[in-house]
Amino acid sequence: MYVCICKNVTDHRIRETVENGARSWREVQQLTGCGTQCGKCACTGKDITREAIRDE
Ligand code: FES
């Protein structure tokens, strides 16, 4: 599903970014652009990032 409409970022993309080494929400933001425009997706993006890091 799309998490970030502004930057076209899916939950899959966030998980993939963590699998590829991102270790924080900030890093995911820098690498995907998620949450860097209107900011509405930040809570969801952060939750998915935390979950993905926990599952690593
Ligand atoms: Fe993600 Fe706007 S929906 S920055």
Image (cartoon, rainbow, N blue to C red):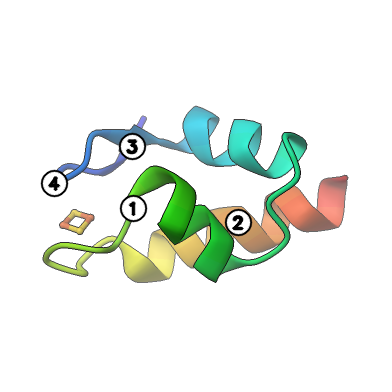
The disc label shown at residue 49, or none: 2
Q: Position of residue 49 (x, y in %)?
A: 60, 56
Mark 1 Cβ and ligand 1 under 8 Å apart: yes
Of the numbered discs 2 and 4, the one sitting upstream in the chain is: 4
Marks 1 and 2, Cα distance to the nearest angstrom? 11 Å
Instruction: From the image, tell me which residue sits under label 4.
Output: 6
Disc 4 crowd rating (10 Å Cα; few below 14, some 14-19, many 20+) is some
Label 3: state its secondary structure.
Answer: strand
Q: Are marks 1 and 3 in contact (CB under 8 Å)?
A: yes
Disc 1 crowd rating (10 Å Cα; few below 14, some 14-19, many 20+) is many
| Identity of the residue drawn at 39% across and 70% down | 43
Of the numbered discs 1 and 2, the one sitting upstream in the chain is: 1
| Identity of the residue drawn at 44% across and 57% down | 30
Mark 4 Cβ and ligand 1 under 8 Å apart: yes
Q: Position of residue 18 (x, y in %)?
A: 69, 44
Marks 2 and 3, Cα distance to the nearest angstrom? 12 Å
Label 4: state its secondary structure.
Answer: loop
19 w.r.t. 40: above or below: above
Marks 2 and 4, Cα distance to the nearest angstrom? 18 Å
As drawn, which residue projects farthest toward the right? 56
| Identity of the residue drawn at 63% across and 31% down | 16
Of the numbered discs 1 and 3, the one sitting upstream in the chain is: 3
Instruction: From the image, tell me which residue sits under label 3.
Output: 9
In this picture, residue 18 sits left or right of residue 12: right
Disc 2 crowd rating (10 Å Cα; few below 14, some 14-19, many 20+) is many
Label 1: state its secondary structure.
Answer: loop
